[in-house]
Image (cartoon, helix red, strand yellow):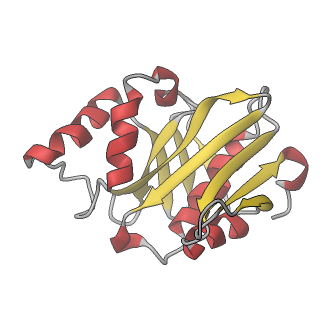
Amino acid sequence: MHSSLSKDLTELTTERLVLRTWTAAEAAAVLDCAGGTRSADWAGDFPSEGDGVIASLLGDNPAWLGTYGHRLIIERESSLVIGSIGLFWPPTEGVLELGYGVVASRRGRGYATEATRVLAAFALTAPAVHTVAAGVELSNPASVRVLEKAGFERYTTTAEDAEGTARFAITRHNSSGK
């Protein structure tokens, strides 16, 4: 799979997706959609609950609107926003956390894996980053598969409750060739 990067670093493009940085206006629109106003550029089931949470946090975390922050996932074929993926900037001791979500109507197509793979590779180009990590509840095996297919390796599992959480990571040394 190939990917390209816009000159201003606001877009990552893959064969099927565009990952574009959020704007403050888009975050406000997501928050306002509870009142019934929806963008014509959104898939019918966007935003999800998780997208609303991220939109509400963007005002308090302006770095998340930057190059290494959160991005909307846009399906190239339809030009519709189908989810979001993001990096929780700044890194902590070289580790950057990643989170993602694709709306139900577009799941099962490999979009989350494609977006995760490309954004993680991009994040590993940042000078202060050597690892991209993500956590997933074991009760969500599809999300576990996304991380595994994107080249992440499991490094810990907690069993604090019946569901447990697994932590995955990809580093500069294991990101090539996967």
Above or below for 135 versus 45: above
- Residue 153: image quadrant is bottom right
Q: Position of residue 41 (x, y in %)?
A: 25, 52
Given the current orientation, which residue lies at the most extreme right position?
173
As drawn, which residue projects farthest toward the bottom?
108
> Quarter-wise, where is residue 83 in the image?
bottom left
Which image quarter holds the N terminus? Answer: bottom right
Q: Position of residue 10 (x, y in %)?
A: 51, 34
Is residue 26 rendered to the left or right of residue 20?
left
Q: Nearer the viewer, residue 59 or 12?
A: 59
Answer with left or right where residue 176 lies relative to residue 136. Answer: right
Left/right of residue 72 with respect to residue 44 in the rendered view = right
Between 130 and 121, the residue placed more toward the observer is 130
Quadrant where the image shows the C terminus: bottom right
Q: Residue furthest front?
A: 161
Query: What residue lies at 50% left-to-right and 64% top-to-bottom?
Result: 16
The picture quadrant where one finds residue 15 is bottom right
Q: Is residue 132 above or below residue 74?
A: above
The residue positioned 61% from the left and 46% from the top of the image is: 98
Q: Position of residue 24 (x, y in %)?
A: 33, 27
Can you give x and y, in whole percent of width and height, for residue 166 in the image? 69, 61
Residue at the (47%, 42%) spot, across then down: 71
Among all residues in the image, which is located at the extreme left? Answer: 36
Tag count in the figure? 0
